[in-house]
Amino acid sequence: MLAPTLAPSSLLGMLWFATLLVVATASRDDVAMLQQPRKDMEPSGLQMTQADSLENMALGPLMLKVKEECLSSTQQCLPALIEARHRVWPYVQAELGKEIKPYEPSSFTADFASAWLKDEVCHGKTFFLLHVWKAVGWGAIRNLQQLVGGNVKRHNRRGWRGDLHPYDCQNVSHPSTFTFVRNPLTRFISGYAQLEHYHQDAIDHRKNFPPNPVLNFLTGKPGSVERAMQFLDRFFVDGVLHDGHVRPQSEYFVKPYGNKCLLAVDFVGKMENVVGDWKRFLDSQQCHVTTQFNLTAGRHNSSSDTKHALADAAGIVGAASIVELQAGAQQSMERALHLQGTYLRALCWLYLVDYVMFRYDLPRGCNHPDMLHIAQLSNISVSDS
């Protein structure tokens, strides 16, 4: 469990390189072009130099600064995340073997659930649950509903009961904010599978839930390795239009409300230990609850084929274990997976903030010397499985 935590410097010379590439529409030719290395660039031009490596030794302290600012939900969280993205981007390019402009982290209005608990349950406290997508968020909301008998308000999502206003988080009884996070790589795989599920469901049933428009331009067969690789290529261009299902979890901690709602996260639990962490959070609030976390509540449907395909595209051996995540398996998937490949290492660099911030061990294969240096500073290691 990640212990309960209470919570940029100026951008460097490469800031002008930070052009945010937001592509609202795309074409099949665009997607095909993104998969090819630049022909006018020699591979050696994308290799990290010794000077680059020495300069990025400062990445370790920067990652720790991001962790401090974002867990405290300060105004410096987003600038620190942007600086970290620019610092890791040369490594991402070197792994992929092509030049891509870095897309920046952005302000993200996360959704919350809030509930007031009776005195006999939890001393009249008010809980705010930060919903991190694809990290047992819906399950936590459903369990919170069960805890309070269904009297839960939802904020900031279209079609829900309204935005989170100052009066929602001020002058309330003993407020406490908590959330759950997940292993960054397995969350990414599950997020991709969820997006494909939504996309196919919308096509088959003409549902109103808007699928991600980028998926319309992926040419591979759903569930195929080819399509998963197209998704990976596009992810390094724009985060597949900054979709919340694959957005780094650290960005959910960006303070979105200015001075309106001051909701620093008091407790961060892990999906891999959700039963124990749910109990520990309630115990920390001195709640009188004996029921365990219901693992089946709030579960999404998604295709196991898409999870297998993405795992194969990223060079993940033993991908069958990924399916267990959809059933709420508790064990860390890093113990069941053997990881390798350039996509994997590029993902590790892009998600490095999450690995540091939430203290997840890096997958085996993410063993660049600079990455290992940062892991050592952050008291995380590389998984041996």
Image (spheres, helix red, strand yellow):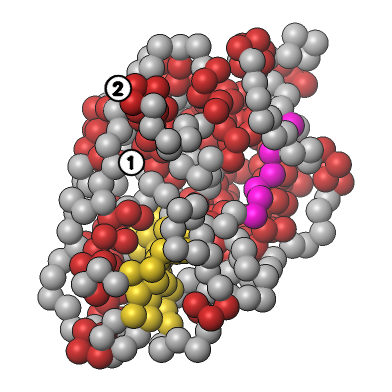
| Residue drawn at point x = 15 percent, y = 66 percent | 292
Disc 1 marks which amino acid? Glu
Q: Which residue is mark 2?
A: 305
Callout 2: helix, strand or loop? helix
Q: Is residue 130 shown to the viewer in this render?
A: no
Q: Distance from label 1 to label 2 (Cα)?
A: 20 Å
- Residue in view at x 67 percent, y 58 percent: 78
**Compared to 105, does 1 lie above or below?**
below
Instruction: Tell me the element at label 1.
Output: helix
Q: Position of residue 314 (x, y in %)?
A: 44, 25
Helix, strand or loop for the magenta stretch, by majority: loop
Mark on residue 93? none
Q: Is residue 153 above or below residue 183?
A: below
Residue 195 in view here: yes
Q: Position of residue 44 (x, y in %)?
A: 74, 19
- Check the image and report above or below for 339 versus 384: above
Characterize the local packing of mark 2: few (<14), some (14-19) or many (20 or more) Cα atoms within 10 angstroms.
some
Pointer 1 residue: 334
Q: Amino acid at mark 2?
A: Asp
Q: Identify the image quadrant of residue 15.
A: top right
Q: Front-most of 21 and 71?
A: 21
Q: Name the quarter where the N terminus is drawn.
A: bottom left
Judge left or right: residue 84 versus residue 301: right
Q: Nearer the viewer, residue 60 or 33?
A: 33
Q: Residue at x 75, y 9 (%)?
A: 39
Residue range corresponding to the magenta coloring = 101-107
